[in-house]
Image (cartoon, helix red, strand yellow):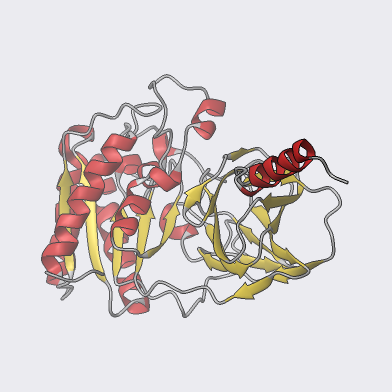
Amino acid sequence: MRTPIAMALASALIAGAAHAAPAPVAIVAAPSPPSLHALPASVSGRVSPEGAGYRYQWPGIYFEAAFEGRELYFKVEPGEVILHVLVDSARLEDMVKPAPGWYRIGGLAPGAHTVRIESVSENQSGPRLFGGFALPDGAQPLPMARRTRQIEFIGDSHTVGYGNISPTRDCNQDQVWAQTDNSQGYGALTARRYNADYRVHAISGRGVVRNFDGGAGDTLPAAYPYVLFDHAQRDTAAAWQPKWIVISLGTNDFSTALHPGEKWASREALHADYEAAYVEFVLGLRARNPQARFILWATDGANGEIQAELKTVVARLKAAGESRVAFIPVNGLTFTGCHWHPSVADDKTIADALTGIIDAADPGTNP
């Protein structure tokens, strides 16, 4: 027979269990996951499918999915990356150079959830591979609502977000990599204001015809057509039809002096080559994106040379019949990121300037 004291203790235990705090949502390594079922991802960015995963190299890639259940698994493949993991729009702990393998997101309440994994680092050294999402028995995939708006951002390190979260301008290369956060770059900030999907096609140090200090490697227009930087596969994704294409190129073409042996005998020859190639690049983008509007922007760096050249490019585009193009001079940035690059505060300033143009072109509407 249960005594009154025993009954009281039992009641207290039951009441305590009923009011216990739920387990926190957390990411844990799952070396031996249960039977799993692939959950297709909605991907924004250029990827090459590989098994249940996706190989990518351009910055700013993100993967999303929706499901019903209390846990989700995802796989990280070898390769140094920084991943942001968000569940129901709440950001969990960041994953910096995570060990390859399966990871479990647990502690979820019963019901429908969304997950988003953002790759926020730059990957010039080689492609990375996200292994995909998976669900355990009992969980169900749900359709992922796609955004109807799309914006594309093309550029160099300013568009990558190079060192933008750094507290100091003095950085070694490891610090640059660790302090680069594309999700806080001006492209992501602008897109979030309109609930738009975005793509970032940018490589630090690259220009229109000349890379930084005359360095080797593809210029940005040469790399642009391809899914990965190896030129093996052209991007032919018909579903990507941005209404706005934002371009910032020229810092690397003009921020350093010409060296003996470079192809341009004078600054004037560099100007002519830059102008012709930039116009050709934009007209090629126009042919692929007949509905798009263009915004070309530049800082006041290189003693105003970049902005002067970009004004000439815009004038030539308009003379060629391109009417849906705008030029924005962006002045007064603090450049307190790594190696005198834009900071997150500067990224907000740039995003504000872009938003002003977009809102003026489409008053009362979004992209």
In this rendering, is residue 306 above or below 316?
A: above
- Residue 269 x %, y %: 26, 47
Apparent side of residue 353 relative to residue 48 in the rendered image (left or right): left
Q: Residue at x 30, y 80 (%)?
A: 290
> In percent of the image, x 43 and y 37: which residue is there?
162
Which x, y percent locates residue 355?
20, 56
Quadrant assignment, res 174: top right
> Is residue 208 in sight in this rendering?
no
> How many labels were placed on the picture?
0
Can you tell which quarter of the image residue 359 is in? Answer: bottom left
In percent of width and height, residue 360 lies at 11, 64
Residue 314 x %, y %? 17, 60
Front in this rendered view, residue 162 or 327: 162
- Between 145 and 324, the residue placed more toward the observer is 145
Work out whether 311 lies above or below 260. Answer: below
Q: Is residue 359 left or right of residue 252?
A: left
Query: Relative to 104, is 299 above or below?
Result: above
Residue sitting at 26 percent across and 70 percent down? Answer: 367
* Left or right: 65 as drawn, with respect to 299: right
The answer to whether any part of residue 122 appears in the image is yes
Residue drawn at 57 percent across, 56 percent down? 229
